[in-house]
Image (spheres, rainbow, N blue to C red):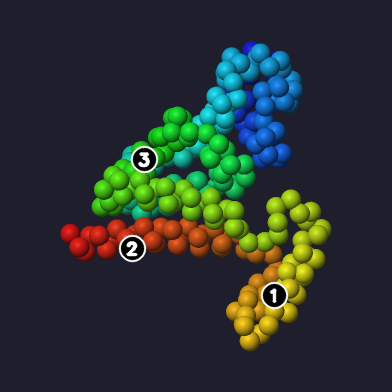
Amino acid sequence: MTGDRLTKAAVAERALRLADEEGLEAVTVRRLAKELGVTPMALYWHFKNKDELLLGMVDHVLSGVRADPATGGPWQKRLRNVVETVVGVMRAHPSLPVLLHAVDKTQTESFNRATNDTLALLTEAGFTVEEGFWVASYLLNACIGIVGAQPGCPPGLPSEQEPEWRRQKRVQLETMPADRFPMMIALAASYRDEPDMEHYYTFCVDLLISAVETTAARRADHT
């Protein structure tokens, strides 16, 4: 890829891939230039320093998070679409939680647009703007937690080692004292097979949206 064909999006995408594979600390202008086959100076046309690069990564990865009122439908459906999109981005880019904490994300167009769209949905649901911001922050951190706590084997474990890992986890739970941890022993059975990840994520998103719906309905009952 030559410098004249190098786009801002291409740089951000490669930086995200590098962060996902090796961690955010691996993302430097010099390393990224080597990955792209250009000189560091070619990257400075798009990002003047690493801080700008990290912000560009956030802006790029969140570009698809929208809650456009023009799409129509009840606020619950549109809010679910936002949450599902954020969860999908988190699943695709495991470096994103660390990245979001490493920069001031309010300096990016995509994050501000997504927040603004979400606040509009939540005010439509009956929350004040301040309450809506609390809800939006809760949802973002919940998405991070859902992906970080997904069931199954540890990230990076070779697939051929997964059955043995599950077996050891099952045995560990099954041998706990039955009089003190009966439910933990019951949980052991869930490690016999690979977890149904899509069911897990659907269940978790349902849980989040139900919490917002219930709170919004309770507020409506008291007005």
Neighbor class of circle 1 (other Cα within 10 Å; few <14, some 14-19, many 20+) is: many
Dot 3 or dot 1: first in sequence order is: 3
Neighbor class of circle 3 (other Cα within 10 Å; few <14, some 14-19, many 20+) is: some
Q: Which residue is mark 1?
A: 173
On the image, the x and y values in percent for residue 54 come to 57, 30
**Would you identify the image quadrant in which residue 209 lies?**
bottom left
Residue at 21% x, 64% y: name it: 221
Residue type at numbered disc 3: Asp
On the image, the x and y values in percent for residue 68 come to 37, 39
Residue with the most extreme bottom position: 179
12 lies above or below 79: above
How far is the residue under mark 2 from the one under mark 3? 21 Å
Q: Secondary structure at mark 1?
A: helix
Q: Which residue is mark 2?
A: 214
Dot 2 or dot 3: first in sequence order is: 3
Residue at 65% x, 72% y: name it: 190
On the image, the x and y values in percent for residue 149 come to 59, 58
Q: Which residue is mark 3?
A: 117
- Tell me whether the residue at label 2 lies in contact with that at label 1, contact meaning CB atoms closer than 8 angstroms: no
Q: Secondary structure at mark 3?
A: helix
